[in-house]
Amino acid sequence: MLEVTSDNKLKRLIVVGDRVLIKPKNPVDQTPTGLYLPPTVTEKEQVQTGYVIKVGPGFPIPAPTEDEPWKETEEKVKYMPLQAQEGDVAIYLQRNAIDVMYGDEKYVIVPQSAILMLERIEDLFN
């Protein structure tokens, strides 16, 4: 399991919006009956599992409009945070995933809506 630390390149990645960067788990290459499956078969399954590496800031919330438009206001974008957190195990739909190679590792980027279920292990990085 990869962890985002200050000395690796994952620290430099910024995930945008409601997207989640996931490191897929190694798929089982053997069926329960003992047949070995080629990697293309296991990668094309509809539901996949992986570790959440980084999450985006969330869904942008529109700023409230003021009655005095001549006032100068700071445009600070506020976000509704995502349910996924770094270190979670995610079960997601493969058809919504975008495969990405980064630093000789395979990752997928999925929108939060493609994540079906999360498993949170509180002491995963401890």
Image (spheres, helix red, strand yellow):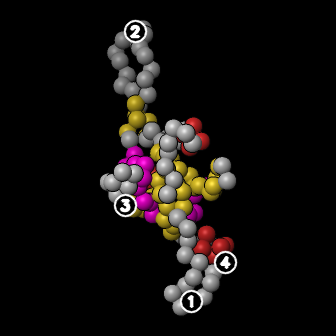
Q: Residue type at mark 2: give it.
A: Lys
Q: Are marks 2 and 1 in contact (CB under 8 Å)?
A: no
Q: Residues within 10 Å of mark 2 (few under 14, many from 20)?
A: few
- Give the secondary structure at mark 3: strand
For marks 1 and 3, give the CA distance.
28 Å
Which segment is the magenta one?
82-98
Q: Which residue has dot 4 on it?
A: 38
Q: Nearer the viewer, residue 77 or 24?
A: 24
Q: Which residue has dot 3 on it?
A: 119
For marks 2 and 1, give the CA distance.
71 Å
Q: Which residue has dot 1 on it?
A: 34
Among the two numbered marks 4 and 2 on one chain, the one whose residue lies closer to the N terminus: 4
For marks 4 and 3, give the CA distance.
28 Å
Q: Residue type at mark 4: give it.
A: Pro
Judged by depth in the image, the label closer to the viewer, 3 or 2, is 3
Is 84 drawn above or below residue 6 in the view shown? below
